[in-house]
Image (cartoon, helix red, strand yellow):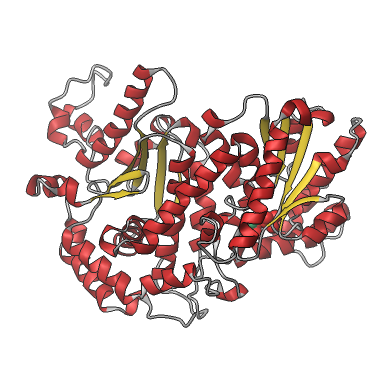
Amino acid sequence: MKSVSRCDRTEAWSRLQALHRSSGSRFDLREAFADDAGRFGRFSFEAPELFADLSKGLIDAATLSALIDLARQCDLERRRDAMFAGEPINASEGRAVLHTALRAPRGAAAHGAEVHAVLDRMLAYAESVRDTASSGIRHVVNIGIGGSDLGPQMVVPALDDYCQRDLRLHFVSNVDGHDIAAALRDLNPAETLFVIASKTFTTQETMANARIAREWFIANGGTDTRKHFVATTTNIEAAAEFGIDTTFGFWDWVGGRYSLWSAIGLPIALAIGASNFRALLDGAHAMDEHFRVTPIERNLPIVLGLLDVWYRNFHGFTSRSVAPYHQGLRRLPAYLQQLEMESNGKRVDLDGDALPYATSPVIWGEPGTNGQHAYFQMLHQGTDVIPVEFILVREPSHAHADSHQKLLANGLAQAQALMLGKSADEAAHEKVPTASATIDPQVLARHRTFPGNRPSTTFLLDRLTPRSLGALIALYEHRVFVSGALWNINSFDQWGVELGKALCNALLPKLASSDVSGLDGSTAGLLARLRR
Ligand code: F6P
């Protein structure tokens, strides 16, 4: 696609700069709520399967309107449509970006015949394995890394309620042998199915672990590797060369970090079954449709992406913390790290020109309430402002109603505390039995002051189901698309992972020999110590 006007050269960008100078940098959430009784309604959004409260964001009507103009001036809708239409928007690799086609109903999108043929076959296979009495399989080990691991590894625990109890899923990703050693320790080859998941079927870590798994299988009396090893890949030939003939394919227009909807989702289908897997796809498709047709003003992924740009480029916030208040979503922050940072951690635009503005923030987090007892101190009183994203689920699937009320109250309270803060005056009037008896009360009050005015977004889901999870993940995918499109970067390549891979291959033989020629002093020194 032809390069479009860069965001920083638009009229809206200049207006946003002026807005930030005049009011944005002094914007105060507490005043905003005091001045506008309708703020919650004005800055909250409905999208399929979820509700989003952006009213605790550092944003007012004028800023939102300028951001929407920015989207229009950057031709965002045309770029979105180009993605859905299968134009080769991943220009540096000459590929279309069509993960949305993987969750479109039969006949509703390009590549439908191939997509549904693989999906039907994969789900039928998953059901045959789930019939554990006849398959004999009780353990599934997914061997993959990055996009061939993080999606299934996040979704399976998130949908634990839907998982079949006599089929356990294990995930091995790291080339660190401790990972596979721990996974294999208590397994029995006759009851184990290995899924070798790799788009390219060349990734060092995955191939090393796949070979270890095959050796372990044979060494421990396993027979019929053809039954116990399957592959999910675009490189069917390489899988065949490895000795695997049950393969589920996908296509180069599915990016690794967007691939859980494809054959890479096989471990999910094995865990939750065919109809639940289809519900996951349906939820994502519902969000695709919301993104595709909803006017910008009410289009949640677009508004979130615009807010991300406002925070990153005008407020200068360098990171965003994700706090899912649901234990099942404990791997969501790790999943989102790859999704956002591998997609938008770029420093040149589509034309290869260095960018004068910042791109991807750091994404990080832990489930609530654990994070509260670790790093929330810094979120409340540290020197950096870090927008936080709370994910709350209204109905739990367990019977501990009291715990759930506490969980929800904690999530709401943290967002409140970030926004409201506590003045030195308020702190000075509090009794603090745990404080030093000798400390000056004014000094103590300063330690106990919270600046407040720290932004957060809250997503509410009624329940964590395959459908709502599908919608939530697709929401994040499209939001990352939006900020990437506004920054005019290619969100779908990942050249930044190449250099380390090449240097590793060059270093490997040097680890075995004593040859440190051509190495920088530090690497040579470390290598020598490692070889002692
Ligand atoms: O880390 C780089 C990367 O290419 C990711 O984008 C990808 O998800 C991962 O490696 C795994 O690649 P593959 O599925 O080809 O093994």
- The residue depicted at 21 percent of the width and 73 percent of the height is 15
**With respect to residue 27, does 132 lie above or below?**
above
- The residue depicted at 34 percent of the width and 41 percent of the height is 379
Residue closest to the far bottom: 2
**With respect to residue 302, does 227 lie above or below?**
above
For residue 107, what is the image quadrant? Answer: bottom right
The residue lying toward the viewer, choosing from 88 and 34, is: 88
Q: Is residue 145 visible?
A: no
In screen coordinates, is 35 left or right of 196? left
- The residue depicted at 85 percent of the width and 57 percent of the height is 509
Residue closest to the far front: 107
The residue lying toward the viewer, choosing from 292 and 92, is: 292
Residue closest to the far left: 35
The residue lying toward the viewer, choosing from 514 and 137, is: 137
For residue 440, what is the image quadrant? Answer: top left
Q: Quadrant of ligand 1?
A: bottom right
Q: Position of residue 154 (x, y in %)?
A: 55, 41
The residue lying toward the viewer, choosing from 190 and 135, is: 135
Q: Position of residue 503 (x, y in %)?
A: 73, 62
In screen coordinates, is 84 left or right of 19? right
Total labels drawn: 0
Q: Position of residue 394 (x, y in %)?
A: 34, 31
Q: Position of residue 185 (x, y in %)?
A: 78, 28
In screen coordinates, is 6 left or right of 516? left
Indicate the quadrant containing the C terminus: top left, top right, bottom left or bottom right: top right
**With respect to residue 107, does 351 lie above or below?**
below
In screen coordinates, is 323 left or right of 502? left
**With respect to residue 163, does 261 lie above or below?**
below
